[in-house]
């Protein structure tokens, strides 16, 4: 899994990433605004970002919480390099290039978040990751999980995906690239909102909740003991 994902995300590193995630995410900026807002409400001192991409979310958080310390883990070396360049002016950031499943922190965090990364993980790896995240959080720490979602109602799901495809294609400059992304997505491991909530509960998190949702995107949150 990691080589394929490394290559795919590495090829998007830089300004291309934001352009494409906005096209394919449709409401990406609204999602990020909400995530940043929720992080800010808890005013954490220590934060872990899993799958930071180009580090745009970390920059937005540090603009609001300049005293916070963020550790950002990113699998793709190209993405990690772009994050470091983008965030060079911020004191509180440490970008680590690694597969999060091998990450072994020496500290615990007030808040851990991951946006649009965990759908890449097969079910067993998701379970492994979630129990690690629980172990990396301080008591009462918050986990925020933003991701692409699946649906139990396949008919409505197909309708949303058809709508998304038509929007993506309206703004297409490279149809072959767009089809490649859709083909990659066929192999993703998306959960429904209720499966996400169940997985959080089964891992032992408390008060799992849905903070925001739009057609095929959602942010869920949960609290450690
Ligand atoms: C769609 S991007 C999301 C980036 C950013 N979080 C955002 O919301 O814009 C997913 C990122 O997760 C990273 N990723 C995927 N699997 C990972 C893993 N096992 N460990 C660390 N990062 C991973 C990818 O390399 C990619 O940069």
Image (cartoon, grey):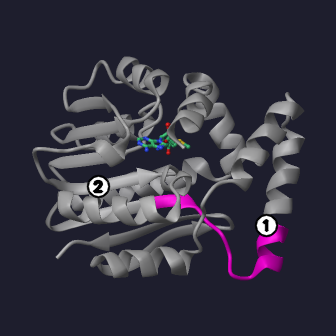
Rendered location of residue 210, percent (x, y): 46, 75
- According to the picture, the residue beneath numbered tag 1 turns out to be 160
Checking the image for residue 112, the label placed there is 2
In the image: residue 179, left or right of residue 11:
right
Whether residue 157 is in magenta: the answer is yes
195 or 65: nearer the eye?
195
Q: Earlier in the sequence, mark 2 or mark 1?
A: 2
Whether residue 19 is in magenta: the answer is no
To which quarter of the image does residue 95 belong?
Answer: top left
Rendered location of residue 107, percent (x, y): 10, 47
Q: Residue at x 37, y 69 (%)?
A: 221
In the image: residue 91, left or right of residue 74:
left
Region rendered in magenta? 146-160
- The CA distance from mark 2 to mark 1 is 29 Å
Q: Quadrant of the N terminus?
A: top right
The answer to whether 7 is drawn above or below residue 222 in the figure is above
Tally of numbered tags? 2
Ligand 1 has an atom within 8 Å of the beta carbon of the residue at disc 1: no
Rendered location of residue 198, percent (x, y): 44, 81
The answer to whether 95 is drawn above or below residue 194 in the figure is above
Q: Quadrant of the C terminus?
A: bottom left
The answer to whether 145 is drawn above or below residue 120 in the figure is below
Disc 2 is placed on an element classified as: strand
Ligand 1 has an atom within 8 Å of the beta carbon of the residue at disc 2: no
Q: Residues within 10 Å of mark 2 (few under 14, many from 20)?
A: many
Q: Residues within 10 Å of mark 1 (few under 14, many from 20)?
A: some
Q: Residue at x 68, y 35 (%)?
A: 20
Disc 1 is placed on an element classified as: helix
In the image: residue 10, left or right of residue 179:
left
The answer to whether 32 is drawn above or below residue 122 in the figure is above
Q: Residue at x 20, y 32 (%)?
A: 92
Rendered location of residue 159, percent (x, y): 84, 70
């Amino acid at each position: 899994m990691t080589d394929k994902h490394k290559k795919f995300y590495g090829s998007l590193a830089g300004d291309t990433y934001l352009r494409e995630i906005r096209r394919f995410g449709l409401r990406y900026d609204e999602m990020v605004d909400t995530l940043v807002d929720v992080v800010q409400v808890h005013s954490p001192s220590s934060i872990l970002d899993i799958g930071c991409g180009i580090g745009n979310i970390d920059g937005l958080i540090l603009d609001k919480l300049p005293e916070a310390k963020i550790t950002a883990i990113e699998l793709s070396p190209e993405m990690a390099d772009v994050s470091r360049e983008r965030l060079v002016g911020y004191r509180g950031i440490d970008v680590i290039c690694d597969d999060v499943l091998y990450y072994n922190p020496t500290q615990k965090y007030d808040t851990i978040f991951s946006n649009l990364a965990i759908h890449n993980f097969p079910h067993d790896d998701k379970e492994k990751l979630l129990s690690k995240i629980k172990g990396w959080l301080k008591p009462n720490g918050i986990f925020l999980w933003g991701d692409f979602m699946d649906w139990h109602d396949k008919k409505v799901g197909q309708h949303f995906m058809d709508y998304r495809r038509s929007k993506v294609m309206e703004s297409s400059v490279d149809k072959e690239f767009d089809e490649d992304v859709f083909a990659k997505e066929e192999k993703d491991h998306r959960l429904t909102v209720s499966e996400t909530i169940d997985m959080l509960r089964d891992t032992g998190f408390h008060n799992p909740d849905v903070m925001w949702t739009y057609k095929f995107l959602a942010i869920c949150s949960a609290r450690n003991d």
